[in-house]
Amino acid sequence: MTKTKNQSIITIVLAILFVVSPLISFAQNLEEKFDTLLNEKYKPDGPGATVLISKKGEIIYHKAFGLANMELETPMKTDNVFEIGSITKQFTAVAILMLMEQGKLTIQDEITKFIPDYPTHGKKITIHHLLNHTSGIKSYTSMNLSEIAAKDMTPTELIDYFKNEPMDFDPGTEWRYNNSGYIILGYIIEKTSGQTYEDFIEEHIFKKLNMNDSRYGHKGEIIKNRASGYQTRDGYVNANYLSMTLPYAAGSLMSTVKDLHKWQNAINTNMLVKAETIQKAFQNTKLNNGKPTYYGYGWTVNEINGTPTIEHGGGIFGYTSYQLYIPDEDVHAAILTNCNCNSPTDITIRLAAIAIGKSYDNKEKITLPKEDLQQLVGVYEFEDSAVRIITLEENQLYSQREGSSKFKIFPKNKTTFFYDDSFSEIQFNKNNKKTEAVFINRINKSKGEKTDRPIPSEKKAIKVSEDVLKQYVGIYEISKGFDLKVTLENGKLISQATGQGPIEIHAETEAKFFVKEFAAAIEFIKENDKVTSLVLHQGGQKTPAKKKE
């Protein structure tokens, strides 16, 4: 019997529905998972976030959470504008590559070609070293930033601020995140293009890509849909003022998640530079000794459960950001937030992992005998200089990096343990009667070995009278422009380093105090029955600080 025309049409429609229905169901399931994670992290009555996820260039998720302005109780919108912090470095790196293609510079040019009087101490510092954080130049954000935070400075004045500082290491021998390098790159862009950094990025990137809501940040301008920035200090407070001349080419740009989506699509389709050129930005550059840095030019190199990623984050007064791209899956995820209190890094990675079907939340733990767990207890030293202390409490194994917090670790098999609410794992292996370990944090791996060192006993705080505590109140100079302020508040001794938050210190003896949150101690020194200085014990170092009169 032959089918009628109508029967054929019905058959085709049903066939399409059988294909489309699972796709709709899959998309709805993804949206529910994303919503659950984001609603938990960004509450409706606190600072918020905008989120965008795309696949194969098309947006599959775009939502806003929390408040754009807490004082006015203004809900966040998907087109709110944020300071993106160090994601700016991607734009600076691509600008350099654009100028390279124009023949105006090379990656191996020395910085003295552009700044002839720069004190390189006889070392060869190249644009390559600046781009991948291996220059050895002192990062100005590790200096006393608070003394210049409100000051408008030209690029030349900013370079003068840090250029005479001693170098941290010889170029190419180490990797250390460095904002000074990107300040110099901004200056090089200006010297070679004949435009200000702001004008170059605006004309050659933002306008070309129709990134209409992106701009160089200025505090004084009225910027439509700007989300207010917040910090935490005994609750939420408005973000401290920072002149946007200071982050400059290292962190001055503002954008939206939709504009970052346009940016990623432009990078993928080679709208700004050739395919072979942009690959330089995504390479896992190496040190002189051949060790990988896991950083290219403006992007870090990483992975999600074995799938390669390129990504970068940003943090600036009142704002945090994260952006991640998975080339093999053509998946892009970006989150912008208006508070330094709720980092989007981990959740961006989790959302991207869910989008490619490689969720980090599917780990199943097994039960191991107490005797097996007990054999792993000890102090382990790792090749990256980290020390991790493995302890067992009521049949639960814990890992604590020296100077950090304690985390539960769970066995997924006899040798591999995963960290609670983390991407990290640690693998144990007995070899020649020694217990070895490998700490794995996504792409980064570090080998370690169990030592004979005893597990340090937990410090216990004692009660000290307020009359004794009052003697320690004062300001102690650790270095020029960097002080440690000690105050007494409601019977508690509080220490606060320049540019940092307050931390309670607890008495171990009448003169020695410790920090519970990380491995640090302060010992107060008396001369002729008067407190004259202190010694800060941290990271194996003893740093003396005289008390200011």
Image (cartoon, grey):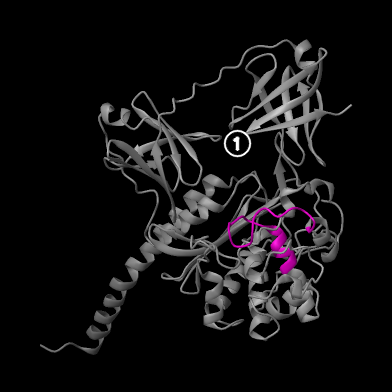
Task: Name the residue at the left extreme.
Answer: 1
Q: Amino acid at mark 1?
A: Gly
The boundaries of the magenta stretch are 163-185
Q: Which quarter of the picture shows residue 430?
A: top left
Number of marks present in the image shown: 1
Task: Name the residue at the right extreme.
Answer: 549
The residue under the point 76% across, 12% down is 468
Q: Residue 127 at what x, y percent from top left?
A: 66, 71
Residue 115 shown left or right of residue 135 in the figure: right
The residue under the point 55% across, 20% down is 459
Q: Residue 14 at what x, y percent from top left?
A: 27, 75
Decide if residue 335 is in sight here: no
Q: Residue 361 at what x, y percent from top left?
A: 39, 48
Q: Main secondary structure of the magenta part?
A: loop
The residue under the point 63% across, 78% down is 97
Badge 1 is on which residue? 539
Q: Nearer the viewer, residue 230 or 380?
A: 380
Q: Nearer the viewer, residue 93 or 412?
A: 93
Decide if residue 163 is in sight here: yes
Task: Name the residue at the front extreme.
Answer: 122
